[in-house]
Image: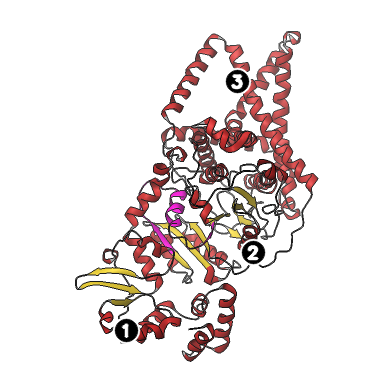
Amino acid sequence: MKRNQEQRFFIACGIGKPHVEAAGKAALENQTTVEQELIAQRLIDPELYYRWLASELGLPYVDRITPEEVVRLASADVLLCRNGPVRLSRPEGQVTVISPEARHLETEKARLEMYPALRRRLVVASPATIRRAVWQSGDEHRIRQSTFALDQDHGSASARRVLTGAQGFVLALILCSGGAAVALWPFASLVALHVMLTVFFSGGILLRLAAIVAAVMGGRRSRRRQDSAGPPPVYTLLIALRDEAAMVPALVARISALDWPKSRLDVKYICEYEDTATIAALEAQNLGPECEIVRVPDFGPRTKPKALQYALQGARGSLVAVYDAEDKPAPGQLREAWMAFSTGDARLGCLQAPLAIANIGSNWLSGLFALEYSGLFRVLIPFLARTGMPIPLGGTSNHFRREALVDVGGWDPHNVTEDADLGLRLYANGYRTGIIRSATVESSPVELGVWLRQRTRWLKGWAQTWLVVMRSPSNTFASLGAVGFTVFQLMIAGMLVSALAHPLMFAFIALTIVWLATGDVSGLPNAHAALMWLDVTNILGSYLIFGAIGWYGFTAYEKARIPYRWLLLAPVYWLLMSCAGWRALAQLARKAHLWEKTPHPVDPAAEIATVRIQPDVATRPSGAENRMKRKPVRPGSKARTWSG
């Protein structure tokens, strides 16, 4: 049945001509069918529609399939990604469940007239009913596979083990040697530690200084006109939820507001089986046919990356985006990401959208959190993208080519900062990360306890990532390159060391001041005097660059929301990060895979308009990219791991 015939069919069924003609136009633009567009626009109720088709064919209709009935074939999970028939095993024999289409209705009728015996072996169900049954029938095997696949296939890239035997030996050797050195040569040992910490502090400051200088010199780039890139692909949105019933109504409304054809959207709300409150809240929203609730069995670590990895097996889109419960993405974000992917080469595996904080003016903690996010997502990450460096991703508003995501092994279910790990794995396998300008608004913690738990998880995950990547330093160096390896150390190890050692820098300065206060200034060696001034420079420099890089990225509206006196609390903010760092270190030893849940405020005190605030460099080749000439990865090739 051609499109015009399909339109006449639905008009004859009683659907208004203007609706059918609009669906026909959308089908032409989106390369879909009129039937798909009418269902997506909710002009047809899928259950009633497929029940009617069943009656037209004279076949039984089922609205529920028990998972025990499903015949588990090796290819059964394909039905999670596309529509198709499923076979059921029943006492009276096997039957096949189909979801007929209007365009093939006459053909199906003729086939049944020719072979009437088929009526005993066919039943009709909606595609959603079939997918639901397939999800349930193979959930035990699927959850085990998604939890352990990365560890089994690329063990060196998995954080399931905190330390390898070799790393444990080296760590013990360092601790024993360090303890002996402090006991035998206390002064020289402290000086050596002092120098090492100074290098990390200085390196981190210089990296951020280079980023803000590049941003100032480059100026604000205007947005380029975006032309159509052809029919839109199916876009999968993965949204992991846990105990988020209160957030569901606002979240569903925000996702529904995205500017993307519903017929080409695949929205997966991912919940744990026992999270009945969130599931009930989702079911109460009367979700559209583009949405489905994926229930994750209780197995393995209870982490967000495990949920994402499980749901990825049912992703129908060639492009995949990740959002959190409190996110409010700009309506045009999917279209901008699609355009960037369309005009970029195959090496562009990921795009990061900037994040803006809605409750920026709630208190000093949320204000400095917003300042930190501004510097990271609007200055530092764009600088790394322009220079072709590895980028530790943000935990939300990441857009992927599904092919690239699967090629590198997807998310690590055992890493509690899965974004940083995945960004580095993409880079090591020849992919690069770009940025887009359409922002996502989210909320910052406003309570110290909540902030501390969230920051602990982030720093623990960064420690996991560093340990995984450094299992084979030589292979890591070869994968990242000299500059990439240096940036990785400054971004990951530098942040960890800076957080852990921040109080020590104050201690070193205090000791030097006490020494000077004794009056024996002439006895202070030049090297120690230089270290003291470096300490002062690092401490003041870290606060100044923290404020400057964030302030530069702020919009005028955001600047007006932060009292200047809050900026003076930067030292307190850094000391709190140090507390979180030490807490993360303790958890790494005892509860490495514990995911401390961060509750989100339902109604932020203020919301920033989701405007484009970030220049698009994702599709603009840079000199650094040409210089590096990183070899693209062939689809289906073996993912590079950190141990070769």
Outermost residue, left side:
91
Nearer the observer, 31 or 331? 31
> Label 1 is placed on what type of residue?
Leu
Say left or right for 279 vs 15: left
Q: Which residue is mark 3?
A: 193
Residue 323 visible to an observer of this rendering: no
Q: Give the class, few, some or many, for how many residues have Cα within 10 Å of label 2's Cα (few <14, many ≥20).
A: some
Q: Which residue is mark 2?
A: 332
Q: Residue 339 in the image: state x and y as whole percent.
A: 65, 61
Could you tell me which residue is drawn at 40 percent across and 47 percent down? 149
Q: Residue 29 in the image: state x and y as whole percent.
A: 60, 75
> Label 2 is placed on what type of residue?
Gly
Q: With respect to residue 225, does 417 lie above or below? A: above
Q: Which residues are magenta?
A: 293-321
Q: Residue 312 in the image: state x and y as whole percent.
A: 46, 56
Say left or right for 498 vs 470: right
Say left or right for 113 vs 166: left
SS under mark 3: helix
Answer with the quarter of the image where residue 502 lies: top right
Q: Is residue 307 magenta?
A: yes
Q: Which mark is residue 112?
A: 1
